Image (spheres, rainbow, N blue to C red):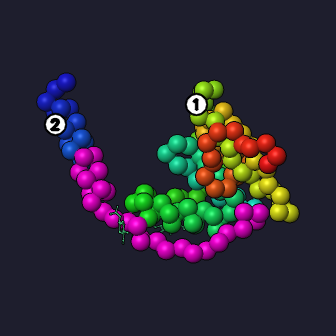
Amino acid sequence: MDIYKFSLLCALLGGAILQLTVAQAKNCSNTCISTVRCSPYFKELVWTVEPSGCRVYQNACIFRNENCSRANQCLPPLVATTRMKCHQFCRRRCQRAGVKVCGWFPYSDSAGRYMSYPNRCLMDQFACQHAQAYVGEPTQGSCPINT
Ligand SMILES: *[C@@H]1O[C@H](CO)[C@@H](O)[C@H](O)[C@H]1NC(C)=O
Ligand SMILES: *[C@@H]1O[C@H](CO)[C@@H](O)[C@H](O)[C@H]1NC(C)=O
């Protein structure tokens, strides 16, 4: 590695460490206050590319609340995009192993369905590929029977 590359690397690393320190020192907990309750049954999908890949939200209300809670964790805001653009970032190459998760997918008329996946990656992949949003954070483990 020549000296130029080395100093560039140092600058990048230094920047990353500085950002980390600033983020830790910052308390974002009251940046965004939202008390809006959203209907999970109202379906008007919002697509956004998150660092882990394309994620679909059931509607703009839920999307805004998520954006808000991210702001309170000092995370960058979510930016909505089109389904087509997002689709290029559907998760691929998920492993079969991992921690099982259970997600809740709302359908119209106050019905929803719990569905188990071998891991979060496969669940996100399903949601993305089938344009079906799960609502809420998935829980760990298989879904309970009778749900
Ligand atoms: C941030 O500030 C709130 C009060 O505004 C406090 O309750 C919370 O514990 C603080 N969090 C951190 C990580 O300092
Ligand atoms: C997301 O949150 C940011 C602030 O963190 C705000 O500027 C932006 O308008 C929000 N976007 C939506 C769609 O709510």
Q: Is residue 29 left or right of residue 37?
A: left
60 in magenta:
no
User: Which residue is disc 2 drawn over?
Assistant: 7
Q: Which residues are magenta?
A: 16-42
Observer-side mark, 1 or 2, equals 1
29 or 8: nearer the eye?
Answer: 29
In the image, what residue type sits under mark 1? Gly
Q: Is residue 35 left or right of residue 144?
A: left
93 or 24: nearer the eye?
Answer: 24
Question: Which residue appears farthest toward the top when viewing the image?
Answer: 1
Is there any visible trace of residue 84 in the rendered image?
A: no
Q: With respect to residue 59, does 118 lie above or below?
A: above
In the image, what residue type sits under mark 2? Ser
Where disc 1 sits, the SS reads loop
- Mark identifier at residue 98: 1
Q: Is residue 74 left or right of residue 123?
A: left
Rendered location of residue 108, percent (x, y): 83, 60
Rendered location of residue 34, percent (x, y): 54, 73
Asked if the beta carbon under badge 2 is closer than 8 A to the nearest atom of ligand 2, the reply is no
